[in-house]
Amino acid sequence: MDDDIDVTVAPSGTGCLDCDAADPPGWWMHLRRCAACGHIGCCDSSPAQHASAHARATSHRYIQSFEPGETWWFDYRSGQMLSGPELAAPTSRPDGQPSPGPQGRVPPDWRDHLHG
């Protein structure tokens, strides 16, 4: 790993920062955390794919899953799964927050909107 990781930075929130800011607000399947700046974005299965969009826009290469019980990392530059250091708490979305989420914004036909 290198300078692309800041273990002291807190996550940007408990949900996808960009989905929450959208008008109308979006929803996500799973969440990913940028290891450089803490940006929480939605995964590539989600309709808006904000985590990978953030990586492209910023050149921040490493993400960690922001799902409860998951500690895996991914490097957008190499396309490889890897291990990394423990990041600042919290390390996942709240256990009570559903996936897909957030509650109240997920359409009944959500499966039809996922990316392969």
Image (cartoon, grey):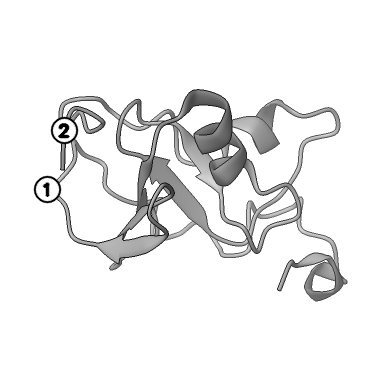
Alpha carbon distance from label 2 to label 1: 7 Å
Front-lying residue, 60 or 43:
60
Q: Position of residue 80 (x, y in %)?
A: 35, 63
Q: Quick one: SS at disc 2?
A: loop
Residue 103, numbered label: none
Q: Is residue 69 left or right of residue 50?
A: left
Q: Position of residue 90 (x, y in %)?
A: 26, 42
Instruction: Tell me if residue 72 can be seen.
Output: no
For mark 2, does the 10 Å Cα neighbourhood hold few (<14), some (14 to 19), or many (20 or more) residues?
some
**Residue drawn at 57 percent across, 65 percent down:** 99
Front-lying residue, 111 or 43:
43
Q: Is residue 97 left or right of residue 44?
A: left
Dot 2 and dot 1 residues touching (CB under 8 Å): yes
Circle 2 is placed at which residue position?
7
**Residue drawn at 39 percent across, 43 percent down:** 33
For mark 1, does the 10 Å Cα neighbourhood hold few (<14), some (14 to 19), or many (20 or more) residues?
few
**Residue drawn at 66 percent across, 55 percent down:** 103
Task: Residue 9: name its quadrant.
Answer: top left
Q: Position of residue 3 (x, y in %)?
A: 18, 27
Q: Amino acid at mark 1?
A: Pro
**Residue drawn at 77 percent across, 29 percent down:** 22
Q: Is residue 77 above or below residue 53?
A: below
Q: Is residue 41 above or below residue 47?
A: above
Instruction: Tell me if residue 76 can be seen.
Output: yes
How many marks overall? 2
Q: Is residue 81 above or below residue 77?
A: below
Q: Amino acid at mark 2?
A: Val
Residue 85, numbered label: 1
Q: Quick one: SS at disc 1?
A: loop
